[in-house]
Amino acid sequence: MTNDTVQQDPATGRRKFLTTAGVVAAGMLATGMLTPAPALAVTPALKFSNIPGTGDIKVVNFALALEDLEADLYVQALQRLTTGGTNKLGKKITGLNLSPNQPDVAYVKEFGVVERQHRDLLRATLGSAAITQFKYDFNMQNLTRKQVVDLIYTAERTGVGAYLGAIPFFQTRTYLQLAGSIQGTEARHTAVIAAVLNRLFREGLEVAPLASDNSGIDRPIQPDVVLAAISPFIVV
Amino acid sequence: MNALEKITGGTSSRRSFMTALAAVGVGAVVASPLLAGNGLTPPPPATSGGAATGVPTDGATQFAAIPGRNINEKVLNFALTLEILEADLYRQALNLASGRPLTTALNSNPSSYKRTVGGGGLNATLTDVGYKYLRDFAYVEAAHRDVLTNAIKSGGGVPVVRNPNGYKFGGPVSPNIASILGGILPLEETGVRAYLGALPYITDLPLAQTAASIFSTEARHSAAINYTLGIDPGPYKKSGDLTVIPNQPSDNTLEYFLKPKTVLSVAGAFFK
């Protein structure tokens, strides 16, 4: 599966000229010059062409962007579900004071550690080529318990497809198995969070694609589609 | 037949293939001489560029027992070997949970199956959920089997075939949902490790994408079954598991993998 249109203008065959905002965002991605205020989502949405690096490095940076978001999402989600806290933007998140024994709280806590490890691992792998850490606004302080867990589910499910969609953008197989070893855990998380949602809220989610759905095989999501989905949460 | 011969569908018409099997030996595990203990060199620092140093070089050895005209076809046949096994064992599991003879073929209508066994200690909700998984995943694994078979055929290759003697659970299984799921679980967990172990041998990235797309459904199945049985959803390290990086931060940070030859040896327990 190829997606040359991400980086190539189909009309001219030349590299797409980045929008002004895209250049700004890409510059911040590369250099870490994030401004603390105003708290606005990055617009227009980031594209794969904005992700710094070339070849495999670009793909690993794309993965890092996802893991960075997931890691921070889990921190804020756990704050919301339990005793509250303050996110990196300084927004106060009031806690819902759920018991640590509740399945959503327990798994959000467990998986949050894993996502932080993924983020740190990819950041260490990339070294100085790594994108900077973003700040995220999930409107967490206004989400219900179910909305929090739904958001986690969406993020994990997106992660499963995002890794798959990124594989053809690798130039070599150097990081293929590492990417797979992370992607499998995202799949496990997705299945468990689906089961938890079914248990707590009777949502009727499938833990895995049925045979009638793409022959029971996970679907890739193109990097630009992933970035469009996560950009509204990224604050620059 | 020895276990490897059974696994790879050896028949009298596959004489050269049998010779290859004999050369591999059963249950042999290749010692990994490299740093990470996984047959791979660790990924280089990102700034050093894109040299393909994370790619294993022992493909000829690892897939010696698997038919195929090239490494990619061998990986597909390796995956198909497992999917045939999984589909068949799920079919048996579903029959057992539905009061049908184990030999009954998978019915084309999923809703024709009704649970006739108890939960085996699972509560009512998890018993129903567990039965649903058995039914749904039985069709999924059959679909995976068919997708791989068709992929190999459409590429002009010859897919491996079902073991003539059939398949069995790796240990005793009682007619209840918990026990049946417990009998299926090792197969799913091995499937996860098999796909991840085979992944870096694939030289074609779109094909690697397809393999990873199946791999992650096996991970979902494993996690869902673990969850239903009340155990950690994983990944958790089992005996013989290899890690993608040395000194993994914790047990459940990354999926584990097994080398293809090891997988074939492990899967032998499910072959009659």
Image (spheres, coloured by chain):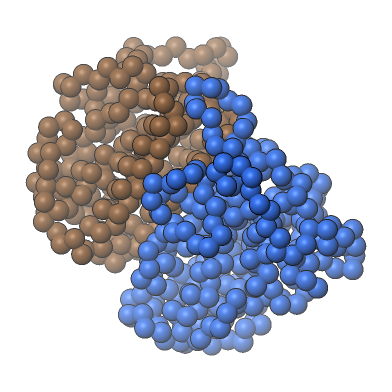
x and y, in percent, of residue B193 in the image: 56, 56
> Residue B80 occupies which quadrant of the picture?
bottom right
State left or right for residue A102 relative to residue B169: left
- The residue located at (24%, 27%) in the rendering is A235
Write down the colour of chain A.
Answer: brown
- The residue located at (71%, 77%) in the rendering is B272
Write down the colour of chain B.
Answer: blue
Q: Is residue A143 above or below residue A30?
A: below
State left or right for residue B117 relative to residue A103: right
x and y, in percent, of residue A11 in the image: 55, 15
Q: Is residue A195 above or below residue A70?
A: below
- The residue located at (11%, 56%) in the rendering is A97
Viewer can see residue B107: no
Viewer can see residue B187: yes
- The residue located at (17%, 53%) in the rendering is A81
x and y, in percent, of residue B268 in the image: 68, 69
Q: Is residue B110 above or below residue B19?
A: below
